[in-house]
Image: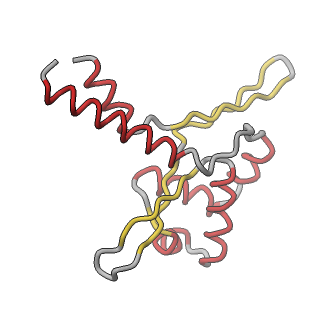
Amino acid sequence: MHKKGAALLQALQRWKRLYRRWATSSVVSEEPDVETIGSLLADPTVRTILARTSQEPMSATTLCDHCESSKATVYRRLDDLSDLGLVSAQTLPDLDGGHHRTVYRATLSRITVTVRDGEIDLEVREREDMADRFTRLVEEM
């Protein structure tokens, strides 16, 4: 591998470790159960938050516009989703105002409910982030 490629790979791996530390800092280690996920998904605000933040990170204010819910309701749902590790928050600098803003991103790609042999199982799949995909691509070169 070229020197530049090796340096790039090393930098990506460092960034990936930092990103994972950030992304998992608010994740609860306990696996969510069917009742908890079911009750959350019954809420149209939660469904809108997950759908919108799966496309791009969004602030709570922007989500309020899409959900047609109050800011307090959106923040409560974001807290619920964050507690289960289904969304992550990132604080970004606001270049226009000189402050910062928090955006939210869905961390899941799929929720699967399986009914078999008298049991109901729930599987929540996390999204593969861009850093993982890019690192895999560079390593395969």
Q: From the viewer's perspective, is 58 left or right of 32? A: left
Give how far across and how far down residue 12 sits, in percent. Answer: 31, 36
Q: Residue at x 62, y 69 (%)?
A: 75
Q: Position of residue 129 (x, y in %)?
A: 41, 38
- Quarter-of-image position of residue 94: bottom left
Identity of the residue furthest to the right in this view: 118
Residue at (12%, 22%) from the top-left corner? Answer: 2
Please give left or right for residue 70 compared with residue 115 in the image: left
Q: Quadrant of residue 33?
A: top right
Give the x, y percent position of residue 49. Answer: 55, 59
Q: Is residue 120 above or below residue 108?
A: above
Q: Which colour scheme appears in the figure?
A: secondary structure
Q: Quadrant of the C terminus?
A: top left
Name the residue at 32% across, 29% down.
135
Q: Nearer the viewer, residue 61 or 141?
A: 141
Asked whether, in this view, residue 90 is left or right of residue 80, the answer is left
Left or right of 82 in this view: 95: left
Q: Residue sitting at 29 percent across and 20 percent down? A: 139
Viewport quadrant of the N terminus: top left
